[in-house]
Image (cartoon, rainbow, N blue to C red):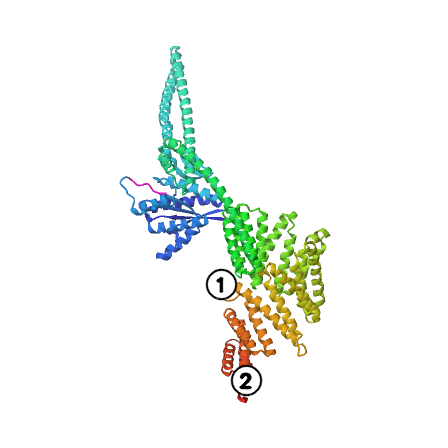
Amino acid sequence: MKEKDIHIFLASSEELSDDRKFINELIGKLQSSYTQRGIRLILDQWENQNPAFKGERTQNEYNSLVRKSDLFVALFHHKAGKYTQEEFEVAYQCCVENKTPQICIYYKALQPKEKEEESLQNFKKRIIKEMEYFTIPPYSHIDTLCLSLVIQIAFLVSGSYDFQNEIRDSQIYYNGIRIADLDKIPFSYNNPEIIDFKKLIAINEKIKEELEKLSAKQAYLLKWEEKYKQLQDEDFLENIQIAKDAIEVIKGNLEKLHIEKDRLNDRIQEQNKCLINVAIEINRCASKASNELLSQATALFESGKCKEAVNLLCSKKIKQNIEQSICDYKQAKEFYEASINTLKTNFNILMLAAKSILANQNDPNRFNKACEARKKAISIAQLYVCPEEYCHLLYKYARFLDKNNRINQAISYYSSTLNHYREILIKNPQRFDIQSGMAKCYNRMGNLYNKLGYLKQAETYYNKSNNLYIDLQNKHLESHFECKLLLIQNNLGVLYYKMGDKEYGQTLIKRQIEKYNRWPQEKKNRYIREIANCWINLGTFYRQDTRKDRQAKRCLEKALECYVQLNALEVGKYESQLADCYYQLGLLFKETNFGKSEDYLLKALEVFLKMKKIKPEIYYPKLARTYESLGNLYFSYYDDTQPVLLQKSIEYYTMALSYDQALERIEQIDFQQNYGPHTAFVGNTYFILGNLYKLDKKYEDSAHSFEQSAETFTRLAAVNKAYNHLLICSYEELAVIYGQIKECWDLSKQYFEYALELAEKHYSNKKELILEKQNAVLSQRAAV
């Protein structure tokens, strides 16, 4: 059995050291009982901490213990010490933010002529007036405190104030452990009913008297019986009978006295049980909202004046308060319901505003404005929707950010969704719909980390999703989680392929296809979208292997066939997936058939441009890569006989650059840094354009492009040294252009120096090649 830890932090000054020892002993007694139930009680107090630490650092350590506690207990007597107050403030702030720890404040009763210090008086004022805390009346004996603490610990363990106790001879037992003596607790020993019931002390005296009489009469009877045996005098029989009659009367009196004693004992037991139940209720109120009448009634009860407490709680004043509170509640309820309706209206207005803002294509800041409106709507919804509905709103917003390439923000909202799902599961662990939602979030986070290149994190989240779906499928066969498992296995296949384990990646996806092929037709039709995704991924793997063009073509055409079928059923819904197939087929035919490759890539571009009009930023990445692929295709087939292909290549690479720059700007805002996942694309495209402009003899444009690639790779090299290689290449190209073409010798020398300096640090084997290029440029200068 896994143990659950209950941390109890005890805060007080050293003046209550004896009381602290009693509490320590009490926790020790309770420990054995709770250990059997898998509960471990941990008492944190300064006596138990490392004495090697002194001063502020030690107090910081105590404060960290306060934050992780489940029950914070503060004891006060004459004063409120600086550190005890600080620990209370930490506990209070933590409770406000996290609903834990539970806070209990106890005051030890003052003896006659004793006074509280100003520090404690001020603390009490703050507790009552500012925080409106209800605190239990001061305890005069440690047993009162022990009883209260055991009740609070029992609540922490079970979540209920159903305190199972036993009373034997005025001793209170909990799970067989003696915790308090009722004869030392004021609410019992000062209680008039208990005092009255304790007449059994007088009864015991009467019983003793009767027993003495009985003993005397029995001796008297024995004496006359002996005389009768000896003398056989009939006159003795009268004395014997008188003694016997007296004995019977005494026995009758004793029986009545014992019955009365048992009755009084039962009444005392019953009364003490009632009093303990009141004490439990008072503990339940501890540290909740304060009330003057409640405080007065509690003080009366604790002092033993139960009837006066009852009279106060049943007084005309409290009845008026109750009537007023009912009236206030009805008004508040009406106001609350009206407020909820207003909140719902405002939520709908903000959601409509968010969608309307996105529709305004002329506003360059429309996405950020829409996000602000949507975030505000979610914050309003949190005030009135149920936890499940709130999770759904968080998830939908995370998906919105995800689709629009706000990766960092999307991860944050997926994480928040998961945290709220976990809170629901704590209360109801069997909610499979919540577990399914969590699995979905894990998968989405895996996708995002995969996109960022954090492959190990992606693997972790995919596996979490996979394990949850396996568990759900085993427990809920009718819910068809197989399609989700098919999706996750597909994602894992792609991930392992990227991680270098290509064979295993392909195997995972092949297994899903084989599983799909074994299913009945009705089931195949249901999961055609998921299997199409498998086909396109497997086709992409094969396309990247030049030996498997035929398999790649077959897989991609299978995927295309599936999406054509799906799109016919729901027109327009699967156009993006169709475009993905066109794009992959375009890349497949790049080396073998220019016409087919161009046709497929242009088809993909046409669809992506169409979709961009509906959901602009979602399709930026796809447009960037399609423009880039077309630029690469045209350059691959360019020669002196077809100069138009060079112009087309420059045109499409320029378009790719514009989308990558737009994505980079989004990522810089999202990640709050001067680079993002698309910064590398920007640098590479600038470098390619530099070479293309050089071929086209547009040297100004070429130099500008290489300068931009150098600036981009400089930013990237600051966080990843691997980019120094591309930075050196950019410097070399700039040095050559400024030397051989533009004849700006000083600039050429400067860029060569930059390249040599980097090579010296990172790639010493490149120094010789750089020097050769520099000498060639210098030779040209000498010739000039």
Q: Where in the figure is residue 669, as x and y percent of width and height? A: 50, 62
Q: Magenta segment, which residues? A: 106-111
Q: Which residue occupies the foreground of this view, 329 or 93?
A: 329
Q: Residues within 10 Å of mark 2 (few under 14, many from 20)?
A: many
Q: Main secondary structure of the magenta part?
A: loop
What residue lies at 43% left-to-right and 51% top-to-bottom? 67
Q: Where in the figure is residue 11, as x and y percent of width and height? A: 37, 48
- Residue named by callout 2: 777
Q: Are marks 2 and 1 in contact (CB under 8 Å)?
A: no
Earlier-in-chain disc, 2 versus 1: 1
- Residue named by callout 1: 672
Q: Where in the figure is residue 260, as x and y percent of width and height? A: 41, 24
Q: Judge from the rendering whether residue 725 lies leftward or rightward of residue 536; answer left or right.
A: left
Is 177 located above or below residue 748 in the figure? above
Residue 568 drawn in magenta:
no
Q: Judge from the rendering whether residue 81 lies leftward or rightward of residue 607; answer left or right.
A: left
Q: Judge from the rendering whether residue 514 lies leftward or rightward of residue 674; answer left or right.
A: right
Where residue 695 sits, quadrant-wise, is bottom right
Q: Which residue occupies the foreground of this view, 61 or 635?
A: 635
Is 639 located above or below residue 197 in the figure? below
Residue 108 drawn in magenta:
yes
Helix, strand or loop at mark 2? helix
Helix, strand or loop at mark 1? loop
Amino acid at dot 2: Val
Amino acid at dot 1: Gln
Task: Farthest residue to the top: give it.
Answer: 234
**Would residue 399 be visible to someone looking at this image?**
yes
Q: Judge from the rendering whether residue 588 lies leftward or rightward of residue 740; answer left or right.
A: right
Q: Which residue occupies the foreground of this view, 217 or 96?
A: 96
Q: Where in the figure is residue 418, as x and y percent of width and height? A: 54, 53
Q: Which residue occupies the foreground of this view, 573 or 99?
A: 573
